[in-house]
Every structure is written in C-alpha cells, then in structure tokens.
Image: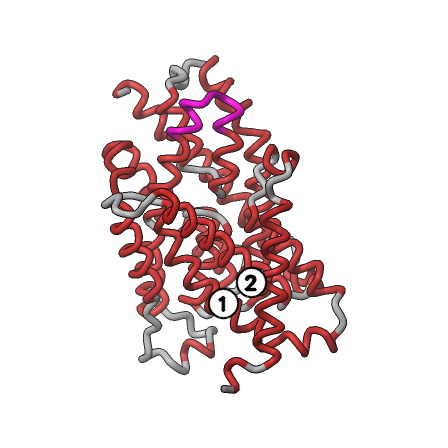
Amino acid sequence: MAYFDKKMILGWTAMVAIAVACLWASQWSWLQSHGVSALILAIVVGIVLGNVTSTRVQQRLDTGIASAKHHALRWGIILYGFNITFQDVFSIGWAGVATDVVVILTVFFTGLLLGTRVFKLDTNEAALIGAGSAVCGAAAVLATAPVIKAKSEHIAVAVATVVVFGTLSIFLYPVLLQQMVAQSWIDGQPVLQGLFIGSSVHEVAQVVAIGKAIDPHTAQMAVIVKMVRVMMLAPFLMLVMWVFARFLPSTNQQAASSKTGITIPWFAFGFIAVAGLNSLHLLPAALLHGLQALDVLLLCTAMVALGFTTQISVIRKAGIKPMLLATVLFVLLLSLSSLSVYLLNPYY
C-alpha cells in the first residue's frame, strides 16, 4: 500500500492541521471585518510556511502535500454545491442572472485577451486572473487550475490579485454606493445595491462584509446574487475547457503535446449534482452544516498545500503585469455592474 505511505500520512496530517488553524483564526473579528476568508488566510499561511520550512521537512511531506492539493481541491469544489440551490437563481429574476452572465463572460475573455496580447502574460496565468475576477475569487482560481493544468505559481499570483482587489472593494464599495444614491444613479433599493455588490466583488466573504456595512437587506440580496454567480462556476469550467481545447495556444507545449486528449473536469458535474441535491432540501440541517464545514476544510487544505508548493521568489518574478491586468478587470467589473444597476433601476 505505497499510496498510504508515511510521507502521504504526514503530508495530509500537516496540511489539515494548518487548515484547521486557519479556520479558527478566520473567525477573529478583525479578519472578518476586513472580509479575509479562511481560503485567503490559508494560502497566505501556506506560502509563508512553505518558504520558511527546511527542504528536509518538505521532502518528508511532499507526497501528502501533492495528494492534498489534488484531491482536497476536487472534492472541495464538488461539496461547494451544498452552499447553493437552484431556488437562488429564481429569487433574483432574469435581470440578476443576465447581469451575472454578462459580467462573467466579459471579464474572463477580456482578461484572457488583454493578458496574453497586451501584457504578454502566460495564457494560464491570464486565464486564472480572469477567472478569479469573473466568477468567485479564490474558489474559481482553484477550480479552473486543473482544467488548464496551471502551475502553482500562476495560481498563487491569481489568488494574490483576489486578495488585493477584494480587500480594496470592502473599503471602496460603501462609499461608491453612497455616491451613486446621492447622484440619483440608483434609488438605494437593497435589491439594486445587492446586485451591484454581488455581481462584481470577488469573494463571498467580501460580499458579506460590504453588505453588512450598508444594511442587512442589502447584504442578503448581495449574497444571493453572488451565489448565483458561484453557481455558474460549472458551466464556466465547461466553457474554459472548450476554449482551451479549440483555441490552444501554440506556445503551450505541454497542452500541445496532448491536444487530442481533452481533460474533462468531472468535478464540475459533481458540483452541479450536489447543488441539485441541495435544492431538494432533503438533508437535515445538521448534516448540511456538517457537509458545508467539511467543504471549507477541504478547500482550505488545498489552499495550504498550494501555498506550500509556491515560492515567493516566483511570485516576485511575475512582476507588476498580473496586477496591472487585475486592475483593468477590477475597473471593468465596476463599470459593468454600475451600468447594469443604472439600466435596471426603472424596473425595481
């Protein structure tokens, strides 16, 4: 049973233990007030520990770390469906769904095109930055990475952009919304403010932090819009798979060598199936909460493992171009969401 050797057990145990510590720390009021989710904290801690831990220790854990990064990620994305129901889609109506679709497609493809053609970034790196901005932050980056076979350093850079601009959103959005209402851009209804927040902010935790800074009703609507955006993760992954298979960059040698073998992200189908099950409301509340907690633990474990395999020197080597791309996408998110709520204002 080489699969369950000592390195495997030690690596998994270390990653899970650190993930549990991050989950505990993420409950601190200061971190919550700044919208720092357990996922973001996990990758930061993982990167720090991965860069200060001796090579000898890392070699003793490497098999388990690699396994955790692979398996914890996929099962975490599947179980993420327990946070979503199809009823969420109906609750915000066609306008909210349409806004989310437009935002996701526009931001992702803009990121992919600008990243590769203007900023000359690696195709995978541009795709991950676009995915993180377009869909649901760190979770979208993690889900997209195995579909396009992205490197650890590209994942870390993409998550870093989520951290920077998601944190900026927490301070910027309440002020923006106040000005939008004052200038009669919108009339201040919770549904419109929630649509603005949920369709453009990166992380769910950041959406909650911004919504609560305004009022409970706005927070509720913002989370619903955001979760509908999260629900689109599965079809988004299908789209990414098709784009990378159909329009494969000639510079991607690894993919080019296996162009005939399309990698199907089966975990995306699992995500849809779990969301469908959750929509039936058959599971007892205690079991549902337990599954949601397990999901967060698995995603945090994957983030810690990812951080452990990422060298800060590699992120530094990426330079300023990824942040410039993320800045453009952040402005695009703001513009699309602002225009959407302005156009929809007369209908609410």
Q: Main secondary structure of the magenta part?
A: helix
Q: Is residue 89 magenta?
A: no
Indicate the colouring scheme: secondary structure
SS of the residue at dot 2? helix
State the residue in front, 166 or 344. 166
Give the amino acid at mark 1: Ala
For the C terminus, the quadrant is top left
Regarding residue 98, the answer to whether it shows in the image is no
Measuring from the top left, give residue 191's x and y in whole percent: 35, 24
Give the amino acid at mark 2: His
Classed neighbour count for the residue bearing mark 2: other residues with Cα under 10 Å, few (<14), some (14–19), many (≥20): many
The residue indicated by pointer 2 is 154
Residue 42: which quarter of the image?
bottom right
Q: What span is in magenta?
A: 211-221
Dots 1, 2 in contact, CB < 8 A = yes
| Total count of labels | 2
- On screen, residue 64 above or below 121: below
Give the spatial CA distance, label 1 vs label 2. 7 Å
Regarding residue 327, the answer to whether it shows in the image is yes
State the residue in front, 164 or 53. 53
Residue 304: which quarter of the image?
bottom right
Measuring from the top left, give residue 222's x and y in whole percent: 41, 31
Residue drawn at x 37%, y 30% is: 195
Please indicate whether residue 81 sits to the left or right of residue 16 in the image. left
Residue drawn at x 60%, y 67% is: 13
- On screen, residue 199 above or below 260: above
Residue 309: which quarter of the image?
bottom right
Q: Is residue 212 magenta?
A: yes
Residue 150: give its label.
Answer: 1
Measuring from the top left, give residue 43's x and y in whole percent: 60, 56
Residue drawn at x 33%, y 63% is: 243
Classed neighbour count for the residue bearing mark 1: other residues with Cα under 10 Å, few (<14), some (14–19), many (≥20): some
